[in-house]
Image (cartoon, helix red, strand yellow):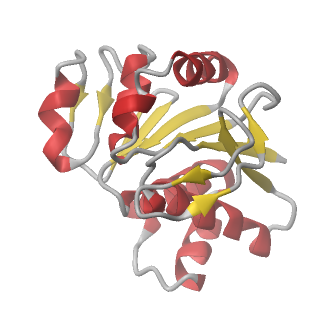
């Protein structure tokens, strides 16, 4: 079973984490018990996202097992999160053994703060591309950018494409396309 951890922090953008959560979790409806998606946070306390949604994490940083896939969302809260040593240390340690470390939107800045994007190709929210380039990142204006074990996606809704792309890598294009079709998301996953 593939283990996925989606990192949460105060003021995270809801769709940044809910999009990948839905896509990756949906895989189990087609291929039962193939993936376990957990919401990970610094503490077990509810996280209040940017638009007011309160979310209970499944697991804390301290008791999170080694993950196969890490998903780091963005949002206004990234400004504090990217300066939080506990979050950056978690990303750094998990990424050493994870198959893929991924970001949605401005979650790319947490990866940049962890030193994971230096000299790599990556993307982020369209208005933050120049800011990300200042981290010695080769910034591309694309929905999904894959460079080695790092996969980044552009603005908020791009987390859906990120999830489909990850499913394509893990389980093949046919399964990924089936997820896209079943959620009525009109996309040809072979173009991701």
Front residue of this view, candidates 148 and 107:
107
Residue sitting at 17 percent across and 29 percent down?
Answer: 131
Front residue of this view, candidates 19 and 99:
19
Give the quarter of the image for residue 28: bottom right
- Give how far across and how far down residue 152 sits, in percent: 40, 40
Quarter containing the C terminus: bottom left
Residue sitting at 47 percent across and 27 percent down?
Answer: 148
- Give how far across and how far down residue 178 sits, in percent: 61, 76
> Can residue 192 be seen here?
no
- Give how far across and how far down residue 128 sits, in percent: 18, 39
Q: In this view, does 181 lie to the left or right of 27?
A: left
Front residue of this view, candidates 106 and 77:
77
Q: In this view, does 41 lie to the left or right of 115?
A: right
Residue sitting at 57 percent across and 56 percent down?
Answer: 168
Q: Is residue 91 above or below residue 75?
A: above
- Give how far across and how far down residue 124 sits, in percent: 28, 42
Residue sitting at 76 percent across and 74 percent down?
Answer: 30
> Can residue 19 be seen here?
yes
Q: In this view, does 40 lie above or below 62?
A: below
Q: How many marks?
A: 0
Q: Is residue 157 above or below residue 77?
A: below
């Amino acid at each position: 079973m593939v283990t996925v951890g989606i990192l949460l922090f105060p003021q995270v953008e809801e769709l940044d984490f809910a999009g990948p959560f839905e896509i990756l979790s949906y895989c189990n409806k087609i291929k039962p018990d193939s993936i376990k998606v957990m919401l990970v946070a610094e503490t077990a306390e509810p996280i209040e996202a940017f638009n007011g949604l309160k979310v209970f994490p499944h697991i804390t940083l301290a008791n999170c097992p080694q993950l196969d896939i890490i998903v780091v969302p963005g949002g206004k809260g990234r400004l504090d999160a990217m300066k939080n040593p506990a979050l950056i240390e978690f990303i750094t340690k998990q990424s050493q053994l994870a198959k893929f470390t991924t970001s949605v939107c401005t979650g790319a800045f947490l990866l940049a703060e962890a030193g994971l994007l230096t000299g790599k190709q990556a993307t982020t929210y369209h208005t933050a591309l120049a800011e990300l380039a200042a981290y010695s990142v080769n910034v591309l204006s694309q929905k999904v950018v894959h460079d080695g074990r790092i996969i980044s996606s552009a603005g908020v809704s791009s987390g859906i494409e990120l999830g489909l792309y990850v499913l394509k890598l893990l389980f093949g294009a046919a399964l990924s396309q089936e997820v896209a079709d079943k959620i009525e998301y009109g996309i040809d996953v072979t173009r991701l």
